[in-house]
Amino acid sequence: MRFMMLMYPRPEAELETSTPADADPVLVNAMVAFNQQLVDLGIMKGGEGLKPTRKGARVKFGKQGSTDVTDGPFIETKEILGGYWIIEVGSLAEAIAWARKAPCPAGEMIEIREVYTPEDFGPEVAAIERRQMEQMAEQEKKG
């Protein structure tokens, strides 16, 4: 079973103007070690940190195909996604156990969501999605 662990940093993290290079080296080293453990066990399938919302935008979909774009930052939002891991484990309980081991400071939160598989949408969609994944892997190899 694949799960996405969504990391929500402390609210003040969105307001900070520091860069990753300014981050607490103890915390950074703990996160690197945690990620390496997941990789070594073959559990981690993906994951990255996200830059603050001030470097992003939101696209909201309206009626009849209209869209509204709002540039960041999104200070009014109480919970901002700060990064994620995709892990493959046997159960939600195992995913929870791994989330509990993540080196997150007090006030941060990890939400865990099971990821749909292509087969959840039927054989036709599954076949298309497998081809798309193969195409993305080939594109990644080409650089």
Image: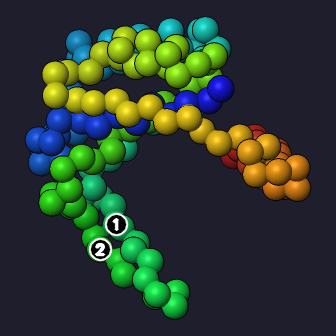
Circle 1 residue: 57
Crowd tier of the residue under label 1, counting other residues whose Cα lies within 10 Å: few below 14, some 14–19, many 20 or above: few
Q: x, y percentage for residue 4?
A: 51, 34
- Cβ atoms at labels 2 and 1 below 8 Å apart: yes
Report the side of 31 relative to 35 (left or right).
left
Circle 2 residue: 70
Viewer-nearest residue: 20 or 50 = 50
Is 74 placed above or below 126 here?
Answer: below
| Residue 139 visible in the snapshot | no
Report the side of 136 relative to 100 (left or right).
right
Q: x, y percentage for residue 2?
A: 62, 29
Q: Hey, what amino acid is under mark 2?
A: Thr
The structure residue drawn at horizontal position 49% and vertical position 36%, both measured from the top left corner, is 113
Q: On the image, which quarter does residue 137 sit in?
A: top right
Q: Earlier in the sequence, mark 2 or mark 1?
A: 1
Which quadrant holds the N terminus?
top right
Q: x, y percentage for residue 70?
A: 29, 74
Q: Hey, what amino acid is under mark 1?
A: Ala
Q: x, y percentage for residue 86?
A: 54, 31
The structure residue drawn at horizontal position 38% and vertical position 33%, both measured from the top left corner, is 111
| Residue 88 visible in the snapshot | yes
